[in-house]
Image (cartoon, grey):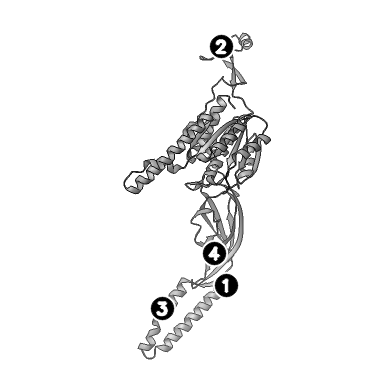
Amino acid sequence: MSLLPGKNLILLAFVLALTGILPALYDGFEPIWLLLGIALIGIAGLDALRLYRLPRPLVGRDAPGSLPLGHWRDIGLRFDNPGGRPLRLDWFDHYPSSFHAEQAWGSARVPAHGHADIHYRVKPLKRGAWHYAQIQWRLHSPWQLWQRDVTRALRSDIKVYPDFAAISHYALLATHNRTNYVGIRQTRQRGEGTEFHQLREFREGDALRQIDWKATMRLQKPITREFQDERDQQIFCLLDCGFRMLTQDGELSHFDHTLNAVLLLAYVATRQGDALGIGAFGGVDRWLPPAKGRGNINRLLNAFYDVQPTRHAADFQRAAAELVRKQKKRSLVIILTNLREEDSSELLAATQLLSRHHKVLIANLREQILDDIQDVSVGNFNNAITLTAANVYRQQRDDFLRRLASRHANLIDVTPRQLTVGLINSYLKLKAARTI
């Protein structure tokens, strides 16, 4: 707590200093000038005393215990005035350094025996466990000659998770059968699965082998058996936490985009009756076996919300051997990574090992700038060099991916923004084809 001069005191002191030249110009003005100075000191002292006699406001913060990465959320502050005089103050909330904030500071007038409610917005830019440590305000004296600076500990713990807000959006679209609005295609064909679902009346286009003759004889009308895609399948996502996943696209890293996509994939798999697990490699060793049910989403969130990409190189072969040892049941194994040509031999060895026991899908991320550069006009020599270099790199990259795809058919190459849709559509396509 400290006492600071207010704007009115500074202004009055400046005026008094300017009038300091008058005693030199006019005889007899010096006593008047001294009296003005003494009066200012007396008034300032009285105002300081009144400031210290003002009641200290009570403050509270309304902050959610969890936030989704990259989304704006409201934070609430409440100042309560227990005294009989209104309070004027300037405030600043010390939000976490990994947050972006709008209007996390300002001024407030708190009425006597009343309160002031304040709201501002924050957007977390990094996952993990964060906390507010304190809040600071400056209380103005009644004549605004002084300010009392107060910093008070006010802790609020917040966990920043991958983008779980996308699940609510998807669930709403799924309720109205509109997932195609975000590019997700339902590929299951009615009556073409492997598990019995229900009996229904025969429809045009149904195969004769689907007819249930006993039910048809009993009800005296054609009845067919309807099947659904096999449930209780397992998906296991291998997340590359190596240095290449540190690459930023917009406000999020490739690893953040990957976690967001896997989280929504887990929700879709849950709706399909499948189980999903996650393993992290490349400087991080964290494994979570596949599980079913809506509770699996919270389980995944709490287990991986604080995992960050490292500066280690990804060891694909070690991760594959570890997965084969831990995951005995045949599964769809999805490797999420950012590949370079030098990774080809190690990755092929890893996929060959995995393919003996599981179905493998490689989800490869490419930098958004490779697509953006294609739209740059060649207006000068520097742009021409940049475009040429990007085209050469992209051609080499495409050649490498074609060679990889020729030996490993299940591969998608997408930008981070396309990853969620591409990943879910690939899963649904493989499930509908009954190749898991």
Q: Amino acid at mark 2?
A: Leu
Mark 3 → mark 1, Cα distance in angstroms: 26 Å
Q: Amino acid at mark 3?
A: Val
Q: Nearer the viewer, mark 1 or mark 4?
A: 4
Residue linked to disc 3: 15
Residue 397 horizontal/vertical position (percent): 46, 38
Residue depicted at 54% across the width and 25% down the height = 188
Secondary structure under the numbered disc 3 in the rendered image:
helix
Quadrant of the snapshot with the C terminus? top right
Neighbour tally class for label 2: few under 14, some 14-19, many 20 plus, Cα within 10 Å: few
User: Hey, which quadrant is residue 191 in on the image?
Assistant: top right
The amino acid sitting under disc 1 is Tyr
Could you say which disc has been placed on residue 214 in the image? none
Calculate the distance from the C-alpha at mark 4 to the C-alpha at mark 2.
Answer: 78 Å
Say which element carries label 2: helix
- Label 1 neighbour load within 10 Å: few <14, some 14-19, many 20+: some
Q: Earlier in the sequence, mark 1 or mark 4?
A: 1
